[in-house]
Image: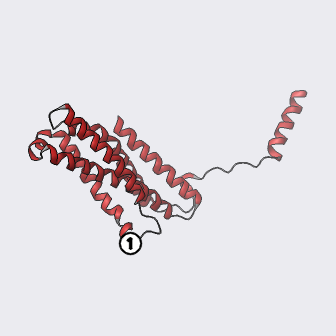
């Protein structure tokens, strides 16, 4: 008898005093953009993160094109420093709704620069003899870190721009949350795929 009374009291407390939490509508959220746009943003995010998390494991092979551990370490260090500079500056220059027309076109340029730099760095890692014979160490110590900086500048700008652009496609808060969530998931899967 006492247990039944406690159960009744418990059910009355949860029913009376607490409002039932609204479930998130997910892909059925009102205001989501066309499925093609969603797929484009998710794909760009996946590929950007996959390339971003692949590149740090490629850079030591690029640096190994030049003999001498000291040279290799200095070249790799310079590439890593400019990696950070590029990423931060790219995020700072990502276009917003208040940006001028030139700054709003930067993600298009980044969409070309990022895969080009990535391809060049992967080819340099695969064919280190080509890099060694074409570029002196002095030239490579400037060119290769700048190439890394351009990649990460494009990456920082693209990631920020894609999230801001996707958010601007809908006025619905739930749709924007769902879109950001799925894009974040695709980015994490891209990062995971680079580590497998």
**Left or right: 38, with 70 as reference point:** right
Task: Tell me which residue sits at (56%, 52%) in the image.
Answer: 26
Residue at the left extreme, as displayed: 133
Q: Position of residue 170 (x, y in %)?
A: 52, 64
Residue 59, quarter of the rendered image: top left
Across and down, in percent, residue 127 comes to: 14, 40
Sort mark 1 into few (<14), some (14-19) or many (20+) by Cα contacts within 10 Å.
few
Is the C terminus in the top left, top right, bottom left or bottom right quadrant? top left
The extreme right residue here reads: 1
Q: Can residue 87 be seen here? A: yes
Q: Do we see residue 51 in this rendering?
A: no
Taking depth in this image into account, of 80 and 156 the one nearest to the observer is 80
Q: Residue at x 55, y 54 (%)?
A: 177
Secondary structure under the numbered disc 1 in the rendered image: helix
| Left or right for 21, reference 189 | right
Taking the spot 83% from the left edge, 47% from the top edge, the residue there is 16
Expressed as whole percent of the image width and height from the top left, the position of residue 65 reads 16, 38
Q: Quadrant of residue 35?
A: bottom left
Q: Which residue corresponds to mark 1?
A: 101
Residue at 50%, 55% in the rendered image: 179
Quarter of the rendering occupied by the N terminus: top right
């Amino acid at each position: 008898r006492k247990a039944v009374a406690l159960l009744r009291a418990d059910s009355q407390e949860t029913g009376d005093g607490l409002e039932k939490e609204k479930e998130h509508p997910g892909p059925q959220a009102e205001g989501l953009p066309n499925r093609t746009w969603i797929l484009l943003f998710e794909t760009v995010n996946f590929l950007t993160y996959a390339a971003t998390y692949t590149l740090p494991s490629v850079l030591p092979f690029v640096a190994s094109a030049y003999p001498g551990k000291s040279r290799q370490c200095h070249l790799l260090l310079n590439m890593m420093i400019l990696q950070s500079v590029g990423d931060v500056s790219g995020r700072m220059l990502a276009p917003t709704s208040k940006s001028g027309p030139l700054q709003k076109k930067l993600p298009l340029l980044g969409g070309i620069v990022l895969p080009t730099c990535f391809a060049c760095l992967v080819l340099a890692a695969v064919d280190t003899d080509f890099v060694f014979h074409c570029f002196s160490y002095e030239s490579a110590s400037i060119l290769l870190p700048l190439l890394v900086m351009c990649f990460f500048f494009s990456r920082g700008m693209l990631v920020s721009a894609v999230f801001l652009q996707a958010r601007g496609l809908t006025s619905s808060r739930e749709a924007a949350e769902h879109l950001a969530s799925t894009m974040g998931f695709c980015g994490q899967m891209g990062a995971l795929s680079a580590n497998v």
